[in-house]
Image (tube, rainbow, N blue to C red):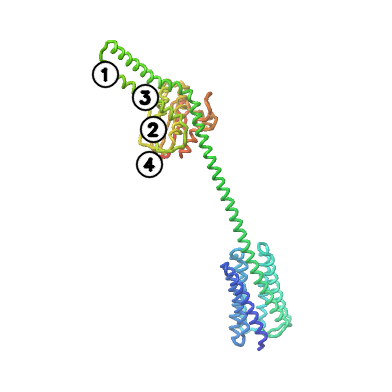
Amino acid sequence: MNLNVQTIFWMDAFLYLMLHAAIWYGLARFRSPVVVMWSVSGILSALSLCVMGSRGWLSTDVVVVVGLFLMAAGNWGRQVALRSLNGPASPMWLCASGGANVAFLALSYGLQFSGSPESTIMLVFYVFYAFNCLEYFFAGKRIALTHDKKGADSVMWAGLILSVTLGVKALAMMAGVGAEDLYEHSWDHALVFIGQFTAIMLLCVGFMQIFVDQDHRRKIATEQQLAREQEQAALSFQHAQDLSALLTEREEIIRQLTLSNKSAGMGALVASFAHELNQPLTANLLHAELLQAKLEEAQRERSTPNLAFLTQVANAVVHDTQRAADIIRKLRNLFRMSKGEYTALKLNEVVQEVLDLVQSKMKDANIGCTVDWDPHLRVHGDATQLQQVVLNLLNNAIDALTESGCDKPELRISGKALGDQLHLEVEDNGPGIAPERAEDVFNLFKTSKSQGMGVGLWLSRSIVEMHGGRLTFQSEPGLRTVFTLRLPLLNETMLG
């Protein structure tokens, strides 16, 4: 029994153990399954060399069975670890590689228990691993495409050294110039051990370089991703600020357009407003003249004025004055500059105030009007802006009926709840809207009126959308047109 060669086996085993244990300890902070697999595989290879160096202390069967199994498991584990650096190893490769190792072990065990000579088992061992270790060379070439080139080169050179030294050993045995005993002093054994020492150091150094480089690249990628996300967050914040400014500007433009649109339509309502105000003012003048006449009469005749009659006339003056003040209030509300103040509103009251203002205009055009409304329906919105929407819809309907020359012009206004929405419909039996004009109805600066601005319906739809609603229309040319305003209902819970 040659203890010197056995000592080399144990020295080789110690090298395997120290290198892989150092990798396990040094890279433990990464908590990587690949590092654990690599280190455990190296420890298995170290145990295999210990078993192979223990013939004489252990039976030959135990040395062959246990030693070859541990060597195959350790070598295959390191190859799987290298394949897993860029993600899980391919199932096809795992099956092929694992199958080759199983076939090798089955052949070796068959030769051992069939009584084949030790040299045959050794030859099968060296031939198998001469080809099997080429996997390290090809793994290094693949890794060089995406990882540290120095580490990949170390793995490639380790694979070449292992394959060449083991191949030379196999050729020497086949040529009859190599040692056929496991512990025999020979040049080919020395070559194999030198190759083992060199290759295992290159493999471990290369693996560490590759893994550290991979972690460094991952950190850089994470920092770059974080920088991109921070940049995107900053851009999103800037966009949010810009959008907020744009929305504020949009609301201001809509408020200004609302006032301009009201002013532009003022000419059409002047006669109506004058008529409405003229009635109470004329009545006040007549009542005041009557009071003056009665008082002068009582003074001339030195009689007591009829207090009951004078009280009745004074009450009439108060009533007409209040009526005039109410008309002025409605006008002031209509032309008030909106501040975007949203409150709970009864939309029927908004509609009624606008109806009062256009009532004289409808009478002059002999337009009949029917109103069907549920007075309990409420919405959340800006009263001035919604008045503008209703005024636009009513003015458009009145203008259409006036221009149509219809015998019995009719305007119908209805309000009802459908689901969680309030539906306000303004319908007229005018000439309708021609199909070719349907797409331009809500477009800005598009109008069929000679004196129109083309702002009213676009503005109305913008206001309705700001209130979370929709404004649509349906028209049957020659029969009718219906504009439908949909707004979210304000329920009792929201009011509370």
Depicted 293 relative to depicted 195: above or below: above
Instruction: Give the crowd class for mark 1: few <14, some 14-19, many >=20 residues within 10 Å.
Output: few
Residue 100 versus residue 406: which sits nearer the camera? 406
Instruction: Give the crowd class for mark 2: few <14, some 14-19, many >=20 residues within 10 Å.
Output: many
The reply to whether callout 1 and callout 2 are in contact (CB within 8 Å) is no
- Disc number for residue 323: 3
Residue 492 versus residue 78: which sits nearer the camera? 492
Distance of label 1 from label 4 (alpha carbons): 50 Å
Q: Which residue is disc 4 drawn over?
A: 495
Residue type beneath disc 3: Arg
The reply to whether callout 3 and callout 4 are in contact (CB within 8 Å) is no
- Residue shown at 46%/26% (left/top)? 395
Where does the image place residue 34, in percent across and percent down from the top left? 59, 68
Instruction: Give the crowd class for mark 3: few <14, some 14-19, many >=20 residues within 10 Å.
Output: some
Q: Which residue is disc 1 drawn over?
A: 307
Where does the image place residue 70, in percent across and percent down from the top left? 59, 77
In the rendered image, is residue 320 in sight? yes
- Disc number for residue 348: 2
- Secondary structure beneath dot 2 equals helix
